Image (tube, rainbow, N blue to C red):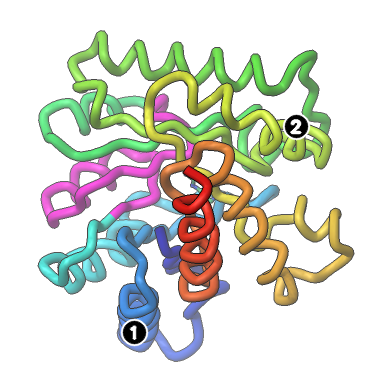
Amino acid sequence: MGVINVTPDSFSDGGRYLQFERALEHARRLAAEGADILDIGAESTRPGASEVDAEVEIARVIPLVRALRGEGKLISVDTSKARVIEAALAAGADIINDVRSLALPGALDAVRGSDCGVVLMHMQGTPQTMQADPRYDDVVAEVATYLRERADALVAAGVARPRIALDPGFGFGKRGVHNRRLLAGLGRIAALGQPVLVGLSRKASLGEMTGRPVDERMAASVTAAVLAVQGGARIVRVHDVAATRDALAVWEAVRREAA
Ligand code: 9MG
């Protein structure tokens, strides 16, 4: 899954049309590098980021969904708001990737009537507050329990189980030690039986481990993606698609010989 952020800090200079053109070019480059899924988002979920109005999200995301649908890749929209979900599905999105696990008002109802895939992610707190003081007794058990209960709630509400992927939410209300334990214990999340999605690309926890700033974290991100797939992840959400695909091709080729 390749990341396409249409946030003010990504493609902001030059007005809305240029922003759209650059985001489209970026999405097509990730597709050419081998991304199977393009994840488009217009609201930053970084620690401390402020919320974006639904109309702004729609204006940034929907033209891209329309431009990219039919180009042979699955289109995922990273949003939590019911109005954006409805607009995304009407425009042809295949997946709703929600860091708030469809908990905002109307979000669950917005996916219920469609056959889209959904990604449910664990987060302790909100993006505004989540890194203030995250605490767990057993992070892997607590995240697994939350994801199991959330998936069960969706199934009870009428969302077919095969539509649901689970994501432990690296960096979302977690300290470095929590992220490392989650990556080491990913098998316990995969054991829940749903496909697991992992997003570690360029995140602060990798900066903490390597001492590298965000623009020098490719090697760490690729290593984390391989470890995640080895630990049971089926989807990795990444910025560096070509390098990640190469690393996974090597991992897969060697694994086949061992099997
Ligand atoms: C939008 N977004 C940013 N980080 C993410 C992560 O780790 N997982 C998912 N599903 N979405 C993310």
Q: Secondary structure at mark 1?
A: helix
Residue at mark 1 to residue at mark 2: CA–CA distance: 37 Å
Q: Is residue 205 left or right of residue 63?
A: right
Task: Give the residue displayed 76% in from the left and 56% down from the top.
Answer: 206
Query: Does the magenta portion include 49?
Result: no
Query: Which residue does the numbered mark 2 point to in the structure image?
Result: 181
Residue 19 screen position, x and y as percent: 39, 82
Q: Is residue 57 above or below residue 81?
A: below
Front-most of 8 and 143? Answer: 143
Write the start and end of the magenta stretch as one range: 76-104
Residue 151 screen position, x and y as percent: 37, 19
Rendered image quadrant of residue 113: top left
Q: Which mark is residue 25?
A: 1
Query: Does the magenta portion include 83?
Result: yes
Q: Amino acid at mark 2?
A: Arg
Residue 255 screen position, x and y as percent: 51, 51
Task: Give the residue displayed 76% in from the left and 39% down from the top.
Answer: 180
Q: Earlier in the sequence, mark 1 or mark 2?
A: 1
Task: Give the residue displayed 78% in from the left and 29% down from the top.
Answer: 134
Q: Amino acid at mark 1?
A: Glu
Q: Is residue 240 above or below residue 120?
A: below
Task: Give the residue displayed 42% in from the left and 43% down from the top.
Answer: 234
